[in-house]
Image: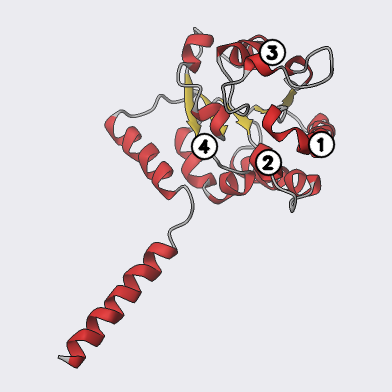
Amino acid sequence: MKRICLFFVGLSLCVTGVLAQTPPFYKDIQQFKELDRQQPPPKKAILFIGSSSFTKWKDVSDYFPGYTIINRGFGGSTLKDLIYYFNDLVPVYHPRQIVIYCGENDLANDATPADSAISRFKQLYSLIRGYNKKVPVAFISIKPSPVRARYLPKVRDANAAIKTFIARQKNTRYIDVFPAMLGENGRPISGIFLGDSLHMNAGGYQIWQKIMRPYLKK
C-alpha cells in the first residue's frame, strides 16, 4: 500500500510539473491552430499580430473592406511572447504584409525600461527578416492608455527609438497613432476607451482606421 501511495504521489508531482511548464498563452496559440484546421486561412493576407488591441478588434475586416486580414492578436501578450511563438504566428500564414501592435504590456510595470521593449522589437524584426527579407512590415506605435499614464514617458521613448530604427529599414513603416489619441490638454482622450481606460471603443478604432488605411497592402 505504501508503494502504491508513493507511486500516485510521484505521478501527481509529474503532472503538476508538466502543467507548470506550460508556457503563457499556449491555449491561445492552440485555439488559432484549431481555427485554421476548421477553416484554412487565406494565403497572402495581411497578418495582424500583437496584443489585446488587436484581439478585441473583432470586426477589423469591416473597417477595411476590400482587404483580406487574418487577426492573430492575443490579449496580454508582450513582444517576448511574439518572439516565443513566432513560428506559430507568422510563417504558417505566408502573409503579404505583417502589421504589429505590441509593446504596451512590456512597459506596463516599473521593472521594464523602454530599452527592453526596443531590443525586443528588434529581435522580433530580425526573426521576420530571417523568414522573409521583403515582406512589408508595419508597426503601430504604442498607444497612450489613460490607466497607464504613469508609463507614458517610457512609451514615448520606446516609440521614438522604434520609429528611428524603422526609418532605416526597407519595406517597413511606422504607423503613428499616438498623437491622434491625445486631447488638447496633452492627455489621452478618455472618450475613445472602454470603462477600463485601457482597451478602445469604436471611436478609438475609427482613429486607427483613418491612420492605418494608407499603409495597408491590397
Quadrant the C terminus occupies: top right
Q: Is residue 200 visible?
A: yes
| Sequence-first tag of 4 and 2 | 4
Q: Would you call the spot at circle 2 few (<14 residues within 10 Å), some (14-19), or many (20 or more)? A: some
Frontmost of labels 3 and 4 is: 4
Residue at the (50%, 7%) spot, across then down: 65
Are circles 1 and 2 on residues that touch, CB within 8 Å? yes
Of tags 3 and 2, the one toward the viewer is: 3
Q: Quote the CA–CA distance across marks 1 and 4.
A: 26 Å
Q: Looking at the image, is 87 positioned above or below residue 60?
A: below
Q: Residues within 10 Å of mark 3 (few under 14, many from 20)?
A: some
Q: Earlier in the sequence, mark 1 or mark 2?
A: 2
| Residue assigned mark 1 | 165
Q: Nearer the viewer, residue 15 or 173?
A: 15
For marks 1 and 3, give the CA distance. 20 Å
For badge 2, the amino acid type reads Tyr
Q: Which mark is residue 211?
A: 3
The amino acid sitting under disc 3 is Ile
Left or right: 105 as drawn, with respect to 177: left
